[in-house]
């Protein structure tokens, strides 16, 4: 806001107004609920309530002072005083929770407005209002009514009616009062929709901002807004959200974390909102939702506003929005005629976004799956990894198709896990030098992985489509709103990228002076030393890999696996040996490698080898040439000049 301008002064005035109202309500609660000063107080009894243009209109009759022991039904009505039309803002109405027959005390400075050609005066400035319970009967009625939410009739008045335009569409003619009040039965297209929409939706809007301004943050049920689904993804649910999903199995589990399905939608004016849906069936698949819903038109109803977030508070969300900006087709401009020449793509990127959620645990989302893909939809732009590594800028969303070669779980804290996926594609494998042949993709705890992805990665090397990952500071990170899929989307913008799959063997970069920690490389050299203090071996189960075998209770000469609950007759011997190598590619550094070996043997041979390992000669391995080992780099230090590696097996 301009310093000292009208907008800044108005903002300060509104803040002072809200503070005064909050302080007054707090004072009323502290002072035995009813202020002692009764001078100028207007006492009314509500006869009827409806809503118009986000304002709650109460048709009331003024009351004379009556004893506090009387119920509202016994209150004296002043027949000489005309009926009043009292206006309450949405915030005041939500505080009062008024119903017909309630008695309201309206404290100064209320104002009376006399309209021309109207017999009913209008009461304004009713911020300082209080509902009064006059008897025990009223208190019991209040507790009973408090359990049920009252449906208030809304008068929907279009601008065409207000300005009496002559070229009205048939659909914009004044609707009957039956359509304005909540109907008894929903009017939907099919049986499945009737379960989804408990109320008939009488109007369809194409502007998210207009819906928010006209219906407010409390929620909108009688109207719906048409939007385009740009992205489908899952977000980890907060603790408060889990109570809503009790009794329903979550669709996805991210380390025991509950998740919810979300839609990033865009309206005809280019504005974005994130719609957070609630419970999902465990049989549903995020990949199917992406294929069925992305790019399709959708109608939202029964939504409420969780928060209005800005770029500074939600960098991850706005990095995704920025990747979809500017629009691929011209969008409408608010406040202007929507002729083709008045539509444009030359607009500044959005600076705020509304986070929406469903109300009452019911999902009010109607997706037109049979319709064609909208022209406003922007499919993910797929790039090769070589092109991504050369991108400038920070916090840019990128999508790519790559083969996962190795995965490694990293635990930062007890409650936060991060996984590294080492990937490559044809654009990296064909590079001679200057760019690594394999890159690490960091998957944070906030990135939800489906069980299908987890099972596929545990089975072996897979080609995975990384949609909307984050690139910045030389790293590729999978964060919130990043989706991992096993199949390439039907619609994607390749942008000249080579999406062909690898056919030959995968090559890793050999260890050299440019090798960094938390990377993978190939290693060759000569053994110059063995760390005898760290050498050890142990038997594992040949079925499940359990390394904590016990002696069988029935037969002490056999090994027993608690996880399989069976005797292990052919254990797998795992051996770890830490050796020091001399590598020509990094001759000035001490190379320390943790080597693993697995040998499938019988129990008799196992006991013989365990006795042999206690008497082996270190000199027998010194000077041995080590071929190309696939290794993970734990650390690279300059003082002392040392590289610590661990032998790994690629997927």
Image: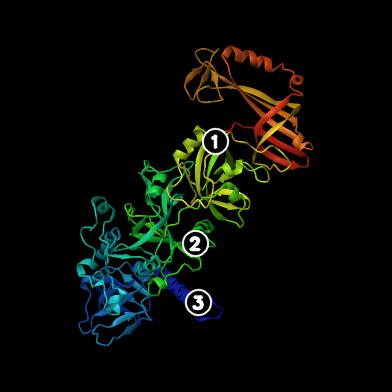
Q: Using the numbered discs, state the Cα–Cα distance from disc 3 to disc 2 in whole angstroms.
A: 34 Å
What SS does tag 3 mark?
A: helix
Image x and y of residue 66, in percent:
26, 76
Quadrant for residue 343, please give it: bottom left
Q: Quadrant of the C terminus?
A: top right
Image depth: mark 3 or mark 2 in front: 2
In the displayed structure image, the side of residue 334 where residue 166 appears, left or right:
left
In the displayed structure image, the side of residue 176 where residue 245 appears, left or right:
right
Image depth: mark 2 or mark 1 in front: 1
Image x and y of residue 75, in percent:
23, 74
Q: Using the numbered discs, state the Cα–Cα distance from disc 2 to disc 1 in whole angstroms.
A: 36 Å
What SS does tag 2 mark?
A: loop
Q: Could you tell me which residue is drawn at 55 percent across and 20 percent down? A: 550
Instruction: Give the residue pinned by disc 1.
Output: 503
In the displayed structure image, the side of residue 17 where residue 573 appears, left or right:
right
Image x and y of residue 38, in percent:
35, 79
Instruction: Work out whether mark 3 precedes mark 2 in sequence or the reverse, and give the earlier one.
Output: 3
Which dot marks residue 123?
none
Give the crowd class for mark 1: few <14, some 14-19, many >=20 residues within 10 Å. Answer: few
């Amino acid at each position: 806001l301009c310093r000292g301008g009208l907008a800044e002064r108005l903002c300060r005035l509104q803040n002072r107004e809200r503070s005064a109202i909050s302080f007054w309500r707090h004072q009323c609660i502290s002072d035995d609920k009813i202020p002692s000063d009764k001078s100028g107080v207007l006492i009314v009894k509500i006869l009827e309530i409806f809503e118009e243009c986000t304002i709650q209109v109460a048709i009331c009759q003024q009351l004379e002072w009556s004893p506090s022991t009387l119920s509202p039904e016994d209150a004296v009505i002043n027949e000489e005083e005309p009926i009043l039309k009292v206006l309450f803002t949405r915030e005041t109405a939500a505080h009062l929770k008024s119903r017909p027959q309630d008695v309201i005390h309206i404290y100064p400075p209320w104002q009376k407005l006399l309209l021309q050609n109207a017999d009913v005066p209008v009461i304004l400035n009713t911020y300082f209002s209080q509902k009064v319970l006059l008897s025990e009967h009223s208190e019991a009625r209040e507790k009973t009514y408090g359990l049920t939410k009252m449906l208030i009739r809304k008068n929907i008045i279009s601008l065409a009616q207000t300005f009496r335009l002559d070229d009205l569409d048939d659909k914009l003619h004044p609707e009957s009062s039956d359509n304005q009040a909540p109907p008894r039965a929903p009017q939907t297209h099919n049986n499945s929709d009737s379960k989804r929409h408990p109320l008939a939706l009488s109007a369809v809007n194409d502007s998210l901002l207009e819906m928010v301004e006209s219906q407010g943050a409390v929620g909108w049920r009688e109207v719906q807004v048409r939007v385009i689904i740009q992205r489908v993804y899952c977000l980890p649910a907060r603790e408060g959200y889990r109570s809503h999903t009790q009794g329903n199995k979550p669709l996805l589990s991210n380390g025991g974390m509950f998740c919810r399905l979300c839609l990033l939608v865009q309206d005809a004016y280019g504005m974005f909102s994130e719609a957070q849906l609630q419970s999902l069936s465990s049989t549903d698949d995020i990949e199917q939702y992406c294929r069925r819903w992305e790019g399709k038109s959708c109608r939202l109803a029964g939504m409420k506003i969780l928060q209005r977030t800005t770029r500074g508070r939600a960098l991850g969300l706005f990095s995704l929005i920025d990747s979809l900006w500017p629009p691929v087709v011209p969008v409408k401009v608010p406040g202007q005629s929507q002729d083709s020449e008045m539509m444009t793509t030359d607009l500044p990127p959005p600076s705020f976004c509304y986070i929406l959620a469903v109300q009452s645990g019911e999902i009010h989302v109607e997706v037109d799956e049979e319709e064609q893909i909208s022209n406003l939809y922007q499919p993910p732009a797929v790039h090769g990894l070589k092109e991504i590594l050369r991108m400038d800028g920070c916090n840019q969303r990128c999508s790519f198709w790559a083969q996962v070669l190795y995965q490694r779980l990293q635990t930062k804290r007890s409650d936060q896990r991060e996984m590294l996926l080492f990937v490559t594609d044809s654009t990296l494998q064909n590079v001679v030098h200057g760019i690594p042949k394999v890159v690490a993709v960091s998957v944070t705890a906030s990135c939800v992985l489906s069980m299908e992805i987890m099972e596929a990665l545990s089975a072996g090397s897979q080609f995975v489509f990384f949609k909307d990952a984050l690139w910045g500071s030389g790293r590729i990170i999978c964060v919130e709103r990043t989706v991992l899929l096993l199949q390439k989307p039907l619609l994607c913008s390749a942008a000249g990228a080579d999406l062909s799959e690898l056919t030959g063997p995968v090559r890793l970069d050999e260890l050299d002076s440019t090798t960094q920690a938390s990377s993978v490389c190939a290693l060759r050299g000569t053994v110059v030393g063995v760390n005898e203090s760290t050498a050890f071996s142990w038997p594992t189960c040949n079925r499940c890999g359990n390394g904590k075998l016990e002696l069988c209770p029935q037969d002490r000469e056999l090994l027993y696996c608690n996880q399989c609950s069976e005797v292990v007759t052919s254990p797998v011997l795992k051996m770890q040996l830490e050796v020091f190598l001399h590598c020509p590619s990094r001759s000035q550094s001490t190379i320390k490698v943790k080597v693993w070996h697995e040998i499938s043997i019988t129990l008799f041979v196992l006991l013989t080898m365990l006795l042999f390992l206690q008497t082996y000669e270190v000199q027998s391995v010194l000077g041995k040439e080590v071929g190309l080992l696939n290794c993970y780099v734990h650390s690279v230090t300059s003082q002392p000049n040392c590289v610590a590696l661990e032998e790994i097996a690629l997927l």
